[in-house]
Image (tube, rainbow, N blue to C red):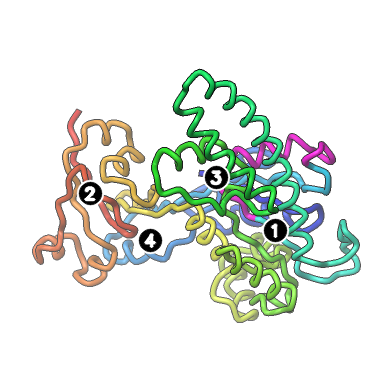
Amino acid sequence: MEAGIVGLPNVGKSTLFNALTAAGIASENYPFCTIEPNVGAVAVPDARLARIEKHIPTQKIVPAVLKLVDIAGIVRGASEGEGLGNQFLSHIRAVDAILHVVRCFEESDVIHVEGSVDPIRDVETIDTELMLADLQSVESMTERATRTARTGDKDAKLRLEVLAECQKLLAEGKPARGLVYEEANLAKAFKELQLLTAKQVLYVANVDEEDLLGTGKHVMALRERATAEGGAVVPVCARLEAELSELDSAERAEMLESLGLSEPALASLARAAYQLLGLQSFFTAGEKEIRAWTIPAGATAPQAAGVIHTDFERGFIRCETYSVDDLDQYGSEKAIRDAGKMRIEGKGYIMRDSDVCHFLFNV
């Protein structure tokens, strides 16, 4: 699963990307780095890993990983080919969710592309370009679906129904993510459209060092906008986070303490992005390794097993599972088993966030 970092030019997007993917915020036992010039992987900080290690000593801890794509700065007219035009559109279309970096600090030395700092205007600029691009896509897809529907194709008729609703919403200046379908066929047709504005958005307010908690007027305006959309805002000082990412653990802890912070803001951002994508973690634990595995919320036990290895899913028999809270309460897997709290789950089990699992399979 991937999240794309978008924003206007010079809002701190690349600074944030570089800080997120710097090895400094990763577990010492797991390598994180930039995979390609604009693609990187970042650890998702999770205190539950340390809680598990407290009871199950291990050689290595491996956190969940989030893949990030740094998308070129978007400018007015991008949907018409201005700037990198189609290149940024294709990159956004390929990701699962959007981290929208919005400048919320004043600084005369950093020129704003629009000449002044106004987070709401900036958000609307990006939204407008994405909606215009989606309108073009919807019109093109409607023409194709109309031709196919004349042959009696049921899927094409279903697609036309969804496209008509999308076009109406976009024409009103509203993003496509406002559409929610309960019926499986309609939901599937909507997802297959791959509209840019259908993707969930997390706003990242790039603040200065005087507003680390995001209580200034610019961030508050952005929070109000996000709340109205059912979204969220994470305040981050990209420049400070870049500095923190270059420090060793002791220096970083000292600097955070001097700022009155318990962890880098990037930790909160990584977790928020993980949740935005509708992801959750389950764990495997042993003396060689404790690892967090990423699955979509609602995944079954066989699907979770398949994340570890396809053979686990293909030959799934059952899984033994307990929660991290159970481990804290009883202190060991043996004590959990003796207390009758070790659960045996079959193929229909829906995984819970915080499950610690052992899978039994046969191929």
Front-lying residue, 60 or 233: 233
- Helix, strand or loop at disc 4? helix
Q: 17 left or right of 309?
A: right
Q: Which residue is identified by label 1?
A: 101
Residue 117 placed where, x, y %? Answer: 83, 67
Distance between mark 2 and mark 1 Cα atoms: 38 Å
Q: Are marks 2 and 4 in contact (CB under 8 Å)?
A: no
Residue 98, magenta (yes or no): yes
- Label 3, residues with CA under 10 Å away: few <14, some 14-19, many ≥20: some
Q: 243 left or right of 58?
A: right
Q: 268 left or right of 221?
A: left
First in residue order: circle 2 vs circle 4:
4
Distance between mark 1 and mark 3 Cα atoms: 16 Å
Residue 122, magenta (yes or no): no
Q: Are marks 3 and 4 in contact (CB under 8 Å)?
A: no
Q: Amino acid at mark 4?
A: Leu
Q: Which residue is identified by label 4?
A: 49
Residue 4 placed where, x, y %? Answer: 63, 47
Label annotation for residue 96: 3
Q: Amino acid at mark 3?
A: Asp
Q: Which residue is identified by label 2?
A: 349
Q: Amino acid at mark 2?
A: Tyr
Distance between mark 2 and mark 3 Cα atoms: 26 Å
Distance between mark 3 and mark 4 Cα atoms: 26 Å
Q: Which residues are magenta?
A: 79-99
